[in-house]
Every structure is written in C-alpha cells, then in structure tokens.
Image (cartoon, rainbow, N blue to C red):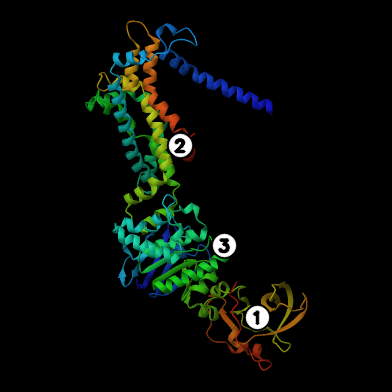
Amino acid sequence: MTYDRLLNTAAAWMLALFWLLPLAYAVWTAFHPAAYETRFDLLAPLTLQNFAQAWSEAPFARYFLNTMILVTGIVAAQFTLCTFAAFAFARFTFPGKSIMFALVLMQLLIMPDILIVENYRTMSQLGLIDTIAAIGLPYVASAFGIFLLRQTFMTVPKELDDAARVEGCSYLGILWRVYIPLAKPTFLAYGLVSVSHHWNNFVWPLIVTNSVETRPLTVGLSIFAVTDSGIQWSIINAATLMTSGPLLIAFLLFQRQFVQSFMRAGIK
Amino acid sequence: MTTGKSITLNALRKSWGDTDTLKGIDLTIPAGQFTTILGPSGCGKSTTLRIIAGLEEVTSGTVQIGGEDVTNRPSSARDIAMVFQSYALFPHLSVAENIIFGLRVRRMPRAERDRKLAQAADMLGLGQLLDRKPSQLSGGQQQRVALGRAIVADKSIFLMDEPLSNLDAKLRAEMREEIRDLQKRLGVTMVYVTHDQVEAVTMADQIVLMNQGQIEQVASPRQIYSTPETLFTAKFIGTPPMGTCAAPALGIARDDITVGIRPEALKLDNAGAIKATVGRVEYLGADAMIDCVVADQTLACRLPGQTDLTPGTAISLRVGPEDLHLFDRDTGQRRADVPAEFAPLFASQDTAPQGPHTSSIER
C-alpha cells in the first residue's frame, strides 16, 4: 500500500517537473543576459532588459489589444448564442429538434482544423480576410458550449420553471432569472476553457490574418521568434512570458474558484 | 385583502398520446372555500391542478375562473398563486428575494414591495431568516417561504400541490393548521391536492375524490365519510378502510349487492345476526382490530383494546341499518334503498341502543 503510494507520488512529481521544465527554462533565460542562455549559474546577474527589448522590437501592445478584442468577442458571442440554443434544446419541443441536436453533436466530433480551407473560403466570400471577426466567427456557434449548457439547463427542476411562469415571467424572463443564474458555474468553466483556447489558438489566426492590426499574440510571437538575425532565446522567452503571463497570473489567482466551478460544471 | 373566486371545470379532458389522464371532469369549486382534491397516485389530481394553474394545456373542455373563461390564458393572467410539492424556491436567491420574485417580475415599486415583504414575513414568522438562502432553511421554513411567495402575490386563488408531503408528521400537523388558518384569514379560494386523506378530511370544506381520471364524489368530509357514493370512495376514506363483502356471505340472497360496514359499526352482540369466526387480532393500544371471517370473506371490526378474543373463537355481531352501506356489485354505485332481504340482519335491534360512533379518521 505504502509502496503504491510512494510510486504515485514520485510519478506525480516527475510529471509536474516535466511540465515545469520549459517554463523554468523560459523564466531563467528571460531574466538573465543572453550570455547565460545555456549556462546555469545561481549568481548570474538578473535583468529586465530582455523584456524591454522584446516590447520595443515588436508591436506587442497592439497584439495584446487584438487578442483581448478577439477573446472577449468570441466569449460574448458564444455565451449569447449557446445560451439561446441550449435553452431551446433543453426546454422546448419543435419539429426537427432531435435532428438538429444530432448535427450539433456531430460538430463535436469534427476537428476544427479539417475545416480550415472551407472556413477560409467562407471568410473570403464574406470579405472578412485579415479581420479580427474572421478569427472568431468560425468558433462562435460552439457545439461544446451548446451541449454543456443544455445539459446544465436540463438539470434545473421543472417546478422552478413552473413557479416562474406562475409569477408572470416570460420565456426570456425565465431564462434570465432562473436558468442563467443557476448555470453560473457552467458559464464560468466554459468561459475559462474558451478564453484559454482562443488565447492560445494559433493555426487559424496565422492563416487568416496578415497584418499587425489583426494579428493576435500567438501569431505575433511566432513571427517575432523567426527573426533572420539568429535566434535569441532570452528575448523570445521574455516575449513568451509576456504573452502567456496574463492567463498564467489569472489562473494562479483564481485557482480555487476555477477548480470549484469545473467540479460543479462536471468538466474534468 | 383579496376575496376568492370560484373555479368551474367543464368536461375537462387531458390525454398524453394514447393515455387519457383526465376523462371528463366537471367540477365547481366554490369561492372562498377550502377544497381538497384527494386520490391515489396517478388518479389525475395533480394534472387537474396544473390545468387550473395554466401549466398544462387541456385536450378538450374549459376552465372558468370567477365566471370568465381562462382556458387559453397564461398562468400569470389567471389570478392564481401556487405552492409546489418541492416548494420551488430559487436556490440562488435569498428568502426575501424568493418571496418578492413575482413582484419584481411585475415591476412593483420598491416601497410597496418592501411593505408586502414585511407583512408576509411577519405573518409567517420569517423575519429572522430573510437574508438566508433556501438551502440554509429547514423543510418547514422552506414551506413557509413558499407560502410567503403566494401571499404577497395577492391572488384570489391558492393552488397547492401536495405541499406537506416532504415534512415529518409533527410538522405536518402544525402546517395543516397554519394553512387552514391562512386560508380563512385571507379569504382566498384554496385548491389543495393531496393523497393523504387525513389532510383532506381535517382541512377541507369540500373534498373532491378522484380515481383513474374521473371524479368519484364531491362532498363535505362528514358526508363523504357517512355516505360514500361509490365502493371506491367507501374503501378509500377511513382508516382502516371500510370492510366489504358480498351480500350472500351474510346469508342474504342478493348476489348483485356488495355490503360495506365500517369497522367501528360492527358491535359484539350474542343476539347479533352476523355469525363470524375471529381471524387475526391486531392490538393497537386503545383499540384492537379484529378480522371477522364471515363465510369465506373478511370484515374488519374495531373493538376496545382490552378485548380478550383469540383467533378461532366464534362470535356474533350486529350492525344498525344506518351503518349498512350497500353498493351495486357491478357498477360500484351506492344503493339508496335497503332491500327487504336485509331485514334479518337487524332482527336483534332491541338489545341495546346505539350511540353515534366516532370517526376513526384521525391518525
């Protein structure tokens, strides 16, 4: 029994260490002069120079803004759309309901990357190539969101629905006053998954954008990293830390709430 | 102060696919009275209530409230408030917010809202609990909050769907009284659905007994106990239920009649016309329930607890003509007359005068 436990603990530590190694390396190089990129010396001088240099060499401020707009836009649109769709699937009967829901579930099975060409064609027909809207639009009707919220809405007792109706709530009133407040943990959990996914999304934004005004952080970072003057790890890692920093800090700060809402929403 | 409105159901039918839940309900619920709809589970009583509330659509028939046809009106336009079996409190709102939920929806000005809240909280003794969440309350307190929500709505009709079934026995007795008081004080029309005949009998002005989607009988508690119109009513009302046997078992040559006798109406009497054998004896403290085997059938008899009868003893019993309930064997309908063939049963009428027997419904 204790042997088993020992093995488990060791494995957990190993995994954590492996996960941490790249991050540790990034932190090490970002805060030390370029000379210490491949040398480990505890007494190496600390510096913030790398951050200043990275910030000045590429329009990271603009990239930050783009990513912020992108992520808030996507999450807001997803919340709205998925809430209405999930409410309809959870509480109404209408012709074709099960077929439509099956279609939604099918979308869950399809890797978004498969659709890159088709999505590109659609965006170009809409005249949206190289806009922030084009990065977000393909992800707005999220099957995952619809499914998740539908499941949550279906757990709301029917009597609460009835009680609100007796008190004079309209359908939208019931949604707003009963279903949404009760699904708060799910919204939070889904919002987190969505934010981190779209903050980190790379391939699609890389394809659909080609200017500083639209590029999100991930694409900006990759372009910055492929400089023709050789790779400077310390500066690249400083930039990497800057771009992933906000999410990392937010997660560390709200760790407890995040985990709780994931547990309550039933996502693992 | 609101005054109640009457409710009239005309030829109400409700079907789910092939199953008919309600098979033609005609019912008048008088204004300002306490009416309970009683019946075994699955008899359609909750469906009836939900149709009155407008939460369920009718398949055919009409619902009138206060003389107006409301069949196609939404719940909120029917002048009703409802208390649900699970109380239906919103778990994310405090007690106060739960009570004034409907007032908020109707955009009532804040001052008036607060006044009504204070009034209802005072009436129900919820003053200390207004900031709590429903999950922090006991069952009885949650029940009160649900009542509070109905009170502040200022409606003419209260609909209650088995509101006490989730409470323990002691609390249930308290709440019974409280709800009855509340109805009297507010003067509203109360429609109260229950499967518990004790609740029905102790609270109601009028009992509507339902079975399999139809109304068996509509009567006051006393009347429904003393003159059940059908065999089903006879067996459903009263604890323990009325004993029944075919008339031939009592030596009467009428095999088209089923005889019903309440356990407390059977008296031990050596000159009695009913000859029986003691079957099971169940000691209940003050009383003892005796199974009297007559021919091949069994009639229950309630005797004082100190009885020394033992199984197998031969006994004689008598019953007064007013305690004899006769039903048509095939239709289950009550027979108004006592046919001449039954006269031998009362032959020893002169032995002892009978006082009115006490009701055995109290638990």
Residue B85: percent from left, percent from top: 48, 60
Closest to the observer: B353 or A43?
A43
Whether residue B75 can be seen here: no
Q: Distance between the residues labelled 3 and 2?
A: 37 Å
Residue B262 x %, y %: 61, 79
Residue at the image point whose x is 43% and y is 46% from the top: A154
Residue drawn at the location 36% of the way across and 69% of the way down: B156
Which image quarter: residue B188?
A: bottom left
Position of the C terminus of chain B by quadrant: bottom right
Which chain is indicated by disc 1?
A: B
Q: Residue B248 carries which label?
A: 1
Mark whose residue sits in front, 3 or 2: 2
Q: Element at badge 3?
A: loop
Q: Distance between the residues labelled 1 and 3?
A: 44 Å
- The residue that mark 2 highlights is A257
Q: Do discs 1 and 3 belong to a common subunit? A: yes
Few, some or many C-alpha atoms within 10 Å of disc 3 (few <14, some 14-19, many ≥20)? few
Quarter that holds the N terminus of chain B? bottom left
Element type where label 1 sits in the image: helix
Q: Residue furthest left?
A: A127
Judged by depth in the image, the label closer to the viewer, 2 or 1, is: 2
What distance separates the C-alpha of mark 2 from that of mark 1?
76 Å
Q: Earlier in the sequence, mark 1 or mark 3?
A: 3
The image position of residue B118, as x and y in percent, is: 38, 62
- Residue type, mark 2 in image: Gln
Q: In this view, does A236 lie above or below B25?
A: above
Q: Which amino acid does label 3 sit on?
A: Asp
- Residue at the disc numbered 3: B168
